Amino acid sequence: MNAPQRQTAYWTLRGHVNRGVQTPTRGLLRVLVGVVLAVTCGCIDAPGSGSPAEWFPLKRALTADDLNGLRASFTPTLSGDYSIALSFRQPMPDIEVRDLVNRSASSIGIGDPVRFDFDWRILRDDKLVAGGTGRDGATGVIDTRAEGLGAGSVKARALAFGKFVAEANQIYTIEMQARPEFASVLRASPDLEIRFEPTSRH
């Protein structure tokens, strides 16, 4: 084999070797990208989906009957911080409640809070874990949108009213006592939610 032939054979062989190395490398990269995307999708609302079901150990529609008091048990599957929230589906036909919720969301941490006339407490084995009141105003707001990455119209707006730490696979009870002034809020049929805070996972 003369020199040009040897050089041609060398580059041909090198090309086969490189392709042999690149193919599994590309495959590995595809796997890594897939893992990253899967993890990301677990933390960000994706189109047509919402937060994972295990983030909500309790989600219950409130009605006028709950003005007499509410008591419900739930069992978290994840250890970490949980918020007590009222979630309002959007758009809200009741203009008065809509304005109340939006004013509350825009005044968190500043000025005179918008007050919601109810108290709550969390129990475990009949022992007090945490408690709070809506009369101090909301402590946070969480908007769920129609599309992921913060895009699309707002499907629901949740107002948080405090939080507590829970252990996985333990039974907890929430007690909520609403007062007559809370009846106007119930016209919007909000959901009472126990919401997991993903950044707090233990």
Image (cartoon, grey):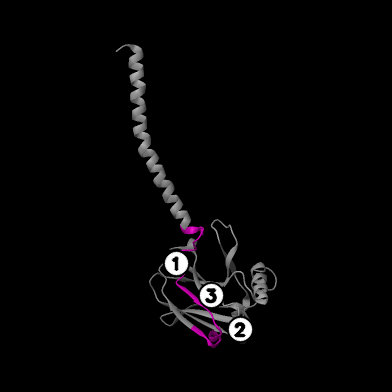
> Is residue 127 part of the magenta span, yes or no?
no
Chain-order first, disc 3 or disc 2: 2
Reading the image, the residue beneath label 1 is 53
The amino acid type found where label 3 is placed reads: Asp
- Could you tell me which secondary element the residue under label 1 belongs to? helix
Q: Amino acid at mark 1?
A: Ala
Specify start and end residues of the magenta stretch as a single range.
42-70
Residue at 38%, 35% (x, y): give it: 22
Camera-nearest residue between 180 and 172? 180
Image quadrant containing the C terminus = bottom left
SS of the residue under disc 2: helix
Which amino acid type corresponds to the residue marked 2 in the rendered image?
Ala
Q: Nearer the viewer, residue 125 or 1?
A: 1
- The residue pinned by badge 3 equals 191
Query: Residue 88, percent across and down?
Result: 58, 72
Q: Is residue 161 above or below residue 201?
A: below
Does residue 51 show up magenta in the picture? yes
Residue 187: percent from left, percent from top: 60, 80
Whole-angstrom CA distance, mark 3 to mark 2, is 14 Å
- What residue would you read off at disc 2? 183
Residue 114 seen in this snapshot: no
